C-alpha cells in the first residue's frame, strides 16, 4: 500500500474487555466466586476461565485479543491455575492476545483518593504482573471513575510509564462540544513539568465504555435491557442491514475525533462469562464488515465521505491502539499537510498540540441536574478509615525496613522476632513468591479500598461493611507486626519486655484498651512509643485515653537514658459520639523532638492523689475568668459565666481566638506576632435538603440489573425516566442535588444562658459548642500550645430524618476575605486546582451552551482530599480535612465542606439503595430480606484544621503531610516495680531530618534479607507556592542509610516496575515528536548519591545496601 492509500484507510480496533468492579453491589469474594447472583449476575472466575478457553479456540480464523485490568481478581485467578493453563496464558501474553491495561490492584477512584493510596495500589498490581508474568502495562484505563484528576493525568500516567490514558466519563456539555469539534481524543498536560499524555474517550464517545449501540453480544445484554443483538445465524440480507448500521456508527465516531484510527471498547461490567458467544459474534462482525465493504455492498465513500476509502477492522488492544495514534500524530507533523480535505484542521492530529487540555475533568455531570458531587462525601467513616489505614501502612513499612536493616547490620540472617511472632499474612498463593512482606493483608485491603466504588462510598451497605472489615483485619495484622518490630528494635530479639505493646487505633473514639486498663491501678506504669513516619523531627501534643483522675506524671527517655518530666494535661472526655468503652479522660502530653522516620519513648505513672476540687477536671486545667463573669463549677466541666456581648478570648502563644461567649462558636482568629493578620470568622453548621421525586423510580430500577449510567441521562437503560432530569433526578450516593430553592438550613448553636464549656491548660485549651435542638452536632475547638493552627473537632449524628427529608450536612466558615469567587482545592493531596464559582470556562474553553446556574450548589462542589483555601491580596483562610470531602465557596469569603450525608432515596445510578447508614446494620439483601436499616443513624467524628496567613498554598503545605501522617501511638504497661531496659532512647532511620519540603513517600524492603529497598522521595511544594520551599531540594541518599554502604542506585518509574532510563528511551513524546531526554545521571546526579528534587517532583529508586565494612 502506498502512503496515500494508508492515509485514506480507517483502522477500526476492536478491544474486547470486561470491567470487573472490585466490590460494588457485591463484595470482592462474591464477585469472584459468583455468589449472591440474586443481586447481580457476575462471576469473575468464570469470566477469566471462559476468556482463556475462547482465546485458545483452534477453530477461529481471527487473532482474538482480550484486555484485563483489575489485578486483585487476576492474581486470585492466576495463582489457582494449573501449570498447563498458566503456560497457555503466558503464550497468549507473549503473542499480545491477552494484555493488560492499568494493571493496578483495582481501578482507583480519582476524586477521593490520596496520592499515597493511588501509588500503593498501582504498585501492588504492577509488582504482581512484573514478577509473575514479566508484564509492564503501558496504558492507563480509568473507564469508570466519575471525573478525572490532574494527579491521574500526570503522576499516575506518565509517572508510572503509561503512554496514554483512556476513560469514559466527562461532563455531558463538554462531551457534546468535543463530539462537534472532533476532540474526543487529544493531549492533556496536568503536571508541573508540562509533559503531555494522550487521552481518549471510550464507549464510542457515548459517556461510558461499552460497544456501539445495537452491538451488545454478551450473555448479560438481555438483563441490561438490550434486545437480541446477535449476528450469528442471521440471513445475509439481515446481516447486511446490521453491518450498514455498524459502519454508519463508525462514520459518526470517526467524525468526532482526529486521525485514522478508532477504538471500539467491546465490553461492559462483568461481560464474557460465556466468552465464546462474544467472540463468535465479533469474529463475524469483522468478517462481514470486510466482506460487504470489499464487494461493494457498502461503499466507504457513502459512509465516510472524502475522508476514507477503506476500512480495516481487526482485534486489537489499548496498547496497539495508542501506538497507532502516535503514528497518526507523527505522520501528520512530518508531512506538514492535512490528512483530510473537508476541513483544514478539524481532523488533523497535528493540531492536538494547539489545544492541550489543562487542569482536570471536574465537575462531572451526565445530564442537566445530575452532578456527581455527592460521592465526594458519601460514607464519611469509611473515607476516614481508608486514610488511617493508608497512613499506618506507610509507617509499618518503615518499621519493617528498620527491623531488616538492624538484622542486616548485626549479620543476623535468622528470621527476626517480629517476623516469627506474626503469622505470615497469606499472599494470593502458597507458591507465590512475588510478595514477601508481612504487611500483605493491609496492602491488599488498602488496594481494594481505592476502588472507585470503595472509598467513594457508592457501594451497597453490606459491601461497605466488607471494605471496612478488610481494612480492620489488615490494620490488626500490621499492628501486631509493627508492635513486635518496635519491641525487637528497643529490646533485641526474643525479648519478653512489654509483650502487650499494641497500637492505639481508636483514638478518634477516645479508646485505648491498654492505657485505660493500666490507668486504673496506681501500681502500673504506662509506656508509650510515639512513631513519626515523616522525614522531619516533630513536636506534637499526644492524646492518650485514660480512666483515672489521678495526677499523672509523664516522662520522656532522653539521650542520656534518663527519664525527664514533661508537660501534660488531663482533660475530661465528653464522649459526644456515645461510644461504648470510651475513656473518661484524655491525657495530653508534649512529645518533643520525635525523630524523623523514628520513635521516642515515654512513660506515665499515676499518683494516689486525686485531682480536687473538680473530680473530673485535672488540677493542671486552670480557672480562667471571662470578662465580668462569675465562675461556676460542675462535677464534669468548668463553666464560665459571661455577659452575652462579651467575647471569650483564648490564645496559645501563636494564635488568639475569640469566641461568642454564649455559644462557644468561633468569631475570629488572629496571629499574635507583630504585624500578624486577623480574620473574622462566622461559623455555621447546616444542611441542604436532598431532592427527591414524589414517586421514586427506585422500585423499578432495582427490579433489573444495573450499570452506573451511559452518559445520556440513562434513558437507554431506564426508559421510565422520561422528560428532563429536573423532574426525576434524586440525590443519592453519587448525586448531590439540593431542592430547587438551593436553601441552606442553618442549625442554630445552643445558647448557654450563663456559661460555655471551656477546659484550659498550659498545653491544650478546649471550647465546646452544640448545635440543634435537641443537639445533634457537637463541636470542640482545640488550641494546642505553640501551634499555628486551630483544630475543630465535630461530632455529627444521628442526622434526624423524622421529617422524611434526606440531609446533606455542611460546615461553613464565612470570612471577610475578598476572594472574588476564586477558591483552591487540592487534587489527591498534590496540586492545588484553581476553581471559580459559576465558571463559564470550567471545561477550559468558552461554552455558551453551558448554564452553571442549573445547579448552582452541587455544580460548584469539588473534591477536597487534604485542603481547601481562599485568599485575597493580604490574607488567606485554609481548612485541612482528615478525609476526603466535597467543598466549595458559594459566596465570597466562605468555605464550606460537606461533612455527612443521610439520604432516603436512590439516585438511579446502579447502587439501588439509599445512602442511609445506621449504627447496628441491615437485614439481608433480597430475596432473603429487604436490606432494612437497623438502629439509629450513624454518628461520625471528624476534624477540620484551620489556618490563616498571607498565602494559602504555603500555609496548607506546612500541615498537609502532618494531617495525613499523624503520630502513631503504641502503648504497653508493666508493674511499676519492674525495670524496663530500653537499649536506646529512641529510633531513627535517618542521619538527620531531610529538607522541610521533602517527604519520604515510601521506604520499604524489597527482599527478605534486607539488602534492597524501594525509596520514593517527594518534593511537596509546587512552583511559586513559597519563596523558600518551592526551590529545588537536595537529598543525599546516604542519609537514609546511615549504618550501611550504598552498593547501587537505580531510578525506577513511579510504580517501580521498570527502570526510568528504559522508559525514557521508549516513551511516546507527544509534546515534541522524537525529542530526546537528558541522561539519568546528568538529571539527578546519582553518581554522588545526591538527588535533586524539582518542585512537586516524585522520584523512585531501588537501592541496594550492605553493612559498613
Image (cartoon, helix red, strand yellow):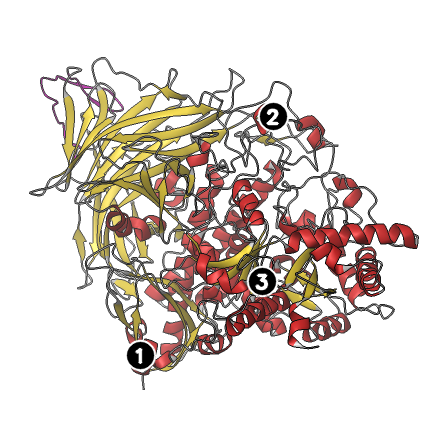
Left-right relation of 217 to 517: right
As drawn, the label of residue 155 is: none
Task: Check the picture and name the quadrant holding the N terminus.
Answer: bottom right
Query: Which mark, residue 728?
Result: 2
Q: Relative to the observer, which residue lies in front, 322 or 451?
A: 322
Residue 56: horizontal and vertical position, in percent? 80, 69
Q: Which residue is mark 1?
A: 1085
Task: Work out whether mark 2 precedes mark 1 in sequence or the reverse, and give the earlier one.
Answer: 2
From which residue to which does the magenta span run?
Answer: 620-642
How far is mark 1 from mark 3, CA to CA? 31 Å
Whether residues under marks 1 and 3 lie with C-beta atoms below 8 angstroms apart, the answer is no
User: Which image quadrant is residue 661 in?
Assistant: top left
Task: Identify the residue shown where x is 49% and y is 41%.
Answer: 382
Whether residue 621 is in magenta: the answer is: yes
State which tag comes first along the sequence, 1 or 3.
Answer: 3
Percent coordinates x, y for residue 113 in the rendering: 46, 49
Asked whether disc 2 touches disc 1, contact meaning CB atoms under 8 Å apart, the reply is no
In-front residue for pair 294/858: 294
**Which mark lies nearer to you, 2 or 1?**
2
- Taking the view exactly as shown, the residue that stands out farthest to the left is 674
Secondary structure type for disc 1: loop
- Is residue 639 positioned above or below 216 on the image? above
x%, y% of residue 669?
18, 34
Q: Marks 3 and 2, Cα distance to the nearest angstrom?
A: 38 Å
Q: Quadrant of residue 357?
A: bottom left
Q: Does the magenta run of residues contain 286? A: no
- Checking the image for residue 103, the label placed there is 3
Q: Quadrant of residue 1018?
A: bottom left
Judging from the image, what secondary structure is the residue with disc 3 in?
loop
Other residues around mark 2 within 10 Å, as few (<14) / some (14–19) / many (≥20): many
Q: Is residue 935 left or right of residue 92?
A: left
Amino acid at each position: 500500500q502506498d502512503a496515500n492509500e494508508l492515509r485514506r484507510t480507517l483502522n477500526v480496533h476492536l478491544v474486547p474487555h470486561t470491567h470487573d468492579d472490585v466490590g460494588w453491589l457485591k463484595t470482592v469474594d462474591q464477585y469472584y466466586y459468583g455468589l449472591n447472583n440474586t443481586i447481580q449476575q457476575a462471576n469473575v472466575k468464570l469470566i477469566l476461565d471462559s476468556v482463556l478457553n475462547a482465546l485458545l479456540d483452534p477453530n477461529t480464523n481471527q487473532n482474538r485479543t482480550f484486555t484485563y485490568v483489575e489485578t486483585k481478581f487476576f492474581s486470585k485467578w492466576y495463582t489457582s491455575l494449573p501449570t498447563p493453563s498458566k503456560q497457555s496464558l503466558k503464550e497468549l501474553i507473549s503473542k499480545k492476545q491477552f494484555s493488560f491495561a492499568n494493571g493496578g490492584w483495582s481501578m482507583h477512584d480519582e476524586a477521593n483518593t490520596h496520592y499515597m493510596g493511588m501509588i500503593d495500589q498501582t504498585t501492588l498490581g504492577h509488582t504482581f504482573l512484573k514478577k509473575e508474568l514479566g508484564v509492564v502495562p503501558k496504558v492507563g484505563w480509568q473507564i469508570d471513575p466519575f471525573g478525572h484528576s490532574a494527579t491521574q493525568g500526570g503522576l499516575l500516567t506518565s509517572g508510572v510509564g503509561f503512554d496514554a490514558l483512556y476513560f469514559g466519563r466527562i461532563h455531558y456539555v463538554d462531551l457534546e462540544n468535543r463530539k462537534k469539534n472532533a476532540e474526543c481524543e487529544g493531549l492533556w498536560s496536568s503536571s508541573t513539568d508540562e509533559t503531555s499524555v494522550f487521552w481518549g474517550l471510550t464507549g464510542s464517545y457515548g459517556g461510558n465504555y461499552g460497544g456501539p449501540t445495537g452491538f451488545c453480544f454478551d450473555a448479560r445484554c438481555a438483563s441490561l435491557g438490550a434486545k437480541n443483538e446477535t449476528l450469528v445465524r442471521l440471513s445475509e440480507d439481515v446481516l447486511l442491514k446490521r453491518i450498514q448500521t455498524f459502519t454508519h456508527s463508525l462514520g459518526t465516531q470517526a467524525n468526532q475525533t482526529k486521525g485514522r484510527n478508532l477504538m471500539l471498547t467491546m465490553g461492559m461490567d462483568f461481560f464474557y462469562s460465556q466468552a465464546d458467544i462474544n467472540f463468535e459474534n465479533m469474529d463475524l462482525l469483522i468478517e462481514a464488515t470486510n466482506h460487504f465493504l470489499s464487494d461493494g455492498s457498502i461503499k466507504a465513500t457513502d459512509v465516510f465521505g472524502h475522508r476514507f476509502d477503506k476500512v480495516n477492522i481487526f482485534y486489537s488492544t489499548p496498547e496497539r491502539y495508542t501506538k497507532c495514534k502516535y503514528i497518526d500524530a507523527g505522520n501528520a507533523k512530518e508531512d506538514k499537510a492535512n490528512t483530510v480535505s473537508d476541513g483544514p484542521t478539524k481532523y488533523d492530529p497535528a493540531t492536538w498540540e494547539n489545544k492541550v487540555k489543562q487542569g482536570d475533568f471536574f465537575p462531572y455531570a451526565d445530564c442537566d441536574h445530575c452532578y456527581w458531587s455527592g460521592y465526594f462525601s458519601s460514607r464519611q467513616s469509611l473515607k476516614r478509615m481508608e486514610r488511617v489505614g493508608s497512613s499506618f501502612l506507610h509507617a509499618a513499612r518503615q518499621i519493617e525496613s528498620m527491623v531488616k536493616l538492624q538484622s542486616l547490620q548485626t549479620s543476623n540472617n535468622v528470621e527476626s522476632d517480629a517476623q516469627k511472632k506474626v503469622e505470615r499474612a497469606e499472599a494470593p498463593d502458597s507458591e507465590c513468591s512475588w510478595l514477601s512482606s508481612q504487611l500483605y493483608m493491609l496492602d491488599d485491603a488498602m488496594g481494594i479500598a481505592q476502588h472507585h466504588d470503595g472509598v467513594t462510598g457508592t457501594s451497597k451497605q453490606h459491601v461497605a461493611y466488607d471494605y471496612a472489615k478488610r481494612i480492620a483485619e489488615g490494620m490488626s495484622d500490621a499492628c501486631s507486626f509493627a508492635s513486635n518490630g518496635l519491641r525487637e528494635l528497643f529490646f533485641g530479639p526474643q525479648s519478653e519486655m512489654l509483650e502487650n505493646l499494641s497500637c492505639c487505633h481508636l483514638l478518634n473514639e477516645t479508646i485505648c484498651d491498654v492505657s485505660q486498663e493500666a490507668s486504673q491501678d496506681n501500681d502500673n506504669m504506662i509506656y508509650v512509643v510515639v512513631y513519626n513516619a515523616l522525614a522531619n523531627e516533630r513536636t506534637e501534643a499526644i492524646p492518650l485515653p485514660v480512666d483515672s483522675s489521678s495526677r499523672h506524671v509523664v516522662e520522656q527517655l532522653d539521650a542520656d537514658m534518663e527519664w525527664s518530666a514533661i508537660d501534660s494535661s488531663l482533660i475530661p472526655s465528653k464522649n459526644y459520639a456515645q461510644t461504648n468503652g470510651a475513656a473518661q479522660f484524655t491525657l495530653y502530653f508534649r512529645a518533643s523532638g520525635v525523630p524523623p522516620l523514628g520513635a521516642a519513648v515515654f512513660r506515665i505513672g499515676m499518683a494516689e492523689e486525686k485531682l480536687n476540687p473538680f473530680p473530673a477536671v485535672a488540677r493542671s486545667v486552670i480557672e480562667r475568668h471571662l470578662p465580668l463573669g462569675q465562675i461556676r463549677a460542675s462535677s464534669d466541666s468548668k463553666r464560665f459565666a459571661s455577659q452575652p456581648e462579651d467575647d471569650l478570648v483564648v490564645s496559645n502563644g501563636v494564635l488568639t481566638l475569640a469566641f461568642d461567649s454564649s455559644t462557644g462558636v468561633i468569631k475570629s482568629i488572629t496571629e499574635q506576632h507583630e504585624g500578624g493578620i486577623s480574620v473574622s470568622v462566622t461559623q455555621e453548621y447546616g444542611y441542604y435538603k436532598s431532592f427527591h421525586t414524589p414517586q421514586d423510580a427506585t422500585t423499578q430500577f432495582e427490579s433489573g440489573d444495573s450499570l452506573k449510567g451511559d452518559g445520556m441521562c440513562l434513558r437507554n437503560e431506564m426508559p421510565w425516566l422520561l422528560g428532563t432530569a429536573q423532574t426525576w433526578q434524586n440525590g443519592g450516593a453519587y448525586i448531590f442535588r439540593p431542592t430547587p430553592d438551593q436553601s441552606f438550613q442553618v442549625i442554630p448553636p445552643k445558647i448557654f444562658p450563663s456559661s460555655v464549656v471551656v477546659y484550659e491548660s498550659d498545653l491544650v485549651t478546649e471550647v465546646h459548642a452544640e448545635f440543634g435542638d435537641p443537639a445533634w452536632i457537637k463541636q470542640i475547638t482545640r488550641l494546642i500550645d505553640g501551634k499555628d493552627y486551630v483544630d475543630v473537632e465535630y461530632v455529627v449524628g444521628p442526622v434526624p430524618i423524622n421529617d422524611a427529608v434526606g440531609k446533606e450536612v455542611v460546615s461553613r466558615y464565612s470570612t471577610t476575605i475578598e476572594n472574588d469567587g476564586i477558591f483552591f482545592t487540592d487534587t489527591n493531596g498534590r496540586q492545588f486546582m484553581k476553581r471559580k464559582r459559576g465558571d463559564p470556562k470550567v471545561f477550559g474553553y468558552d461554552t455558551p451552551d453551558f448554564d452553571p446556574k442549573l445547579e448552582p450548589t452541587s455544580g460548584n462542589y469539588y473534591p477536597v482530599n487534604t485542603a481547601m483555601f481562599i485568599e485575597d491580596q493580604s490574607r488567606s483562610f485554609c481548612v485541612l480535612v482528615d478525609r476526603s470531602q466535597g467543598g466549595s465557596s458559594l459566596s465570597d469569603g466562605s468555605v464550606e465542606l460537606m461533612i455527612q450525608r443521610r439520604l432516603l432515596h436512590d439516585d438511579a445510578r446502579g447502587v439501588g439503595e439509599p445512602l442511609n447508614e445506621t449504627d447496628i446494620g441491615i437485614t439481608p439483601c433480597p430475596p432473603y430480606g429487604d436490606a432494612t436499616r437497623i438502629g439509629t443513624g450513624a454518628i461520625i467524628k471528624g476534624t477540620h484544621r484551620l489556618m490563616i496567613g498571607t498565602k494559602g498554598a504555603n500555609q496548607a503545605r506546612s500541615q498537609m503531610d502532618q494531617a495525613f501522617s499523624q503520630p502513631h501511638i503504641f502503648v504497653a504497661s508493666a508493674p511499676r516495680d519492674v525495670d524496663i531496659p530500653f537499649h536506646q532512647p529512641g529510633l531513627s532511620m535517618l542521619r538527620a531530618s531531610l529538607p522541610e519540603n521533602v517527604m519520604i513517600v515510601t521506604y520499604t524492603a524489597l527482599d527478605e534479607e534486607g539488602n534492597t529497598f524501594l525509596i520514593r522521595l517527594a518534593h511537596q511544594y509546587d512552583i511559586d507556592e513559597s519563596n523558600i520551599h518551592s526551590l529545588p531540594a537536595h537529598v543525599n541518599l546516604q542519609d537514609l542509610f546511615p549504618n550501611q554502604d550504598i552498593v547501587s542506585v537505580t531510578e525506577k518509574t513511579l510504580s517501580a516496575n521498570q527502570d526510568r532510563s528504559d522508559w525514557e528511551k521508549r516513551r511516546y513524546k507527544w509534546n515534541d515528536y522524537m525529542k530526546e531526554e537528558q541522561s539519568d545521571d546528568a538529571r539527578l546526579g546519582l553518581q554522588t548519591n545526591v538527588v535533586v528534587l524539582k518542585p512537586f517532583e516524585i522520584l523512585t529508586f531501588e537501592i541496594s545496601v550492605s553493612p559498613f565494612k
